[in-house]
Image (cartoon, rainbow, N blue to C red):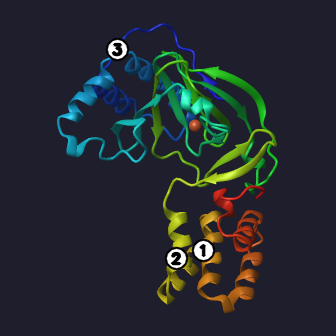
Amino acid sequence: MPIEIKLPFDDKSIELEEYVDIIETQKYDFSRQEDIIDSSPYLKQLNNNKNLLIERITSELQDLQAFQKSNLYGPKVFILLSHPKFFLRAVVWEPISQLERSIKGFNYDICHDHNFDILTAGYFGPGYETRTYTYEYNKTTGCLGEKIDMKQKKIYALPEGKILLYRAKEDIHIQLPPESLSISLNLIPNNGSIKAPQYQFDESTHTICRYLQNSGNELMVRMAGALGDDNMINILEKIFEANTNRHIGALAAVSLIQLCPARNEEIKEQVLGKHNTLLTDIFFKELAKAGTCLGLFENN
Ligand SMILES: [Fe+2]
């Protein structure tokens, strides 16, 4: 479950430039959760600035061509600041609509962890509720279907002014729709991500049911196997040998077999020779059925 940061009453309001100035002057290291927590009084003061969002939108709307140019999220996420050490975003949380409510099996969110820390403040509205758990990443192999000890189940709300820290690869949560339109303000460090994909969890079985890849690397490696030629073989071999990312390494090995079917047994032996449970698990699952790790099929 996330850490709720309880701060003394403070109605001081600061501008975005002042916030950046303070963060830079204090030399916070946002790869450390202690520093993120120590900086939270200033996020609270920024969060007190109720002109922040509308002033920013007004200014950006004056140049529609450049509007949210660096925003890789979607229309409900608004990037307020992209700093070398962190970025700030506002996220809009809509209540569930009548149509959505009528769709059988409709899910407002999925149960997931993060591979980066998020310090979040309720900026506007009653806020979402979030059902949270905690798990021990270091005791997890990360295989699809792996049983996870999801502990400390608790529901939090994020009303205006409340601050929570979601810890990378420690907290699990699923957002529940707010009663009315709500906005949260997020601080996300640029240097604190863990080199493993986010996991989606099945709350009924407490298992990892999908990897949430947020970079294009996985797709590129898959496409290399499906569409590549001889020029791609050497590149895929290097990715496989690099040992930096088990997920990408396993997919590179599968793509190699797609391009060189005659090397099937040789590559299988190379994978097994690395003696890595996660690499082997992903490799054989994807070899048996391409797309398994994308959660494309039920009963993975
Ligand atoms: Fe989340």
Residue type, label 1: Ala
Residue designated by label 1: 252
Give the amino acid at mark 2: Ala
Task: Locate residue 88, reporting x and y percent.
Answer: 40, 34
> Which mark lies nearer to you, 1 or 3?
1
Asked if 226 appears above or below 47 in the picture, the reply is below
Q: Secondary structure at mark 2?
A: helix
The residue located at (53%, 14%) in the rendering is 7
The answer to which of 31 and 73 lies nearer the viewer is: 73
Task: Give coordinates of residue 25: x percent, y percent.
Answer: 35, 30
Which residue has dot 3 on it?
13
Which residue appears at 30% of the width and 42% of the height? 68
Mark 1 crowdedness (10 Å alpha carbons): few <14, some 14-19, many ≥20:
many
Furthest-bottom residue in this view: 262
Which tag is nearer the camera, tag 1 or tag 2? Answer: 2
- Can residue 29 be seen by looking at this rendering? no
In the rendered structure, which amino acid carries the disc numbered 3? Ser
Which quarter of the frame holds ligand 1?
Answer: top right
Kindly state the secondary structure of the residue where label 3 is placed.
loop
Quadrant assignment for the C terminus: bottom right
Whether label 1 lies within 8 Å of ligand 1 gets the answer no
Q: CA distance from mark 1 to mark 2?
A: 8 Å
In the rendering, at what x and y percent does residue 290 appear?
Answer: 66, 69
The residue depicted at 41 percent of the width and 34 percent of the height is 89
Q: Position of residue 53 (x, y in %)?
A: 33, 25
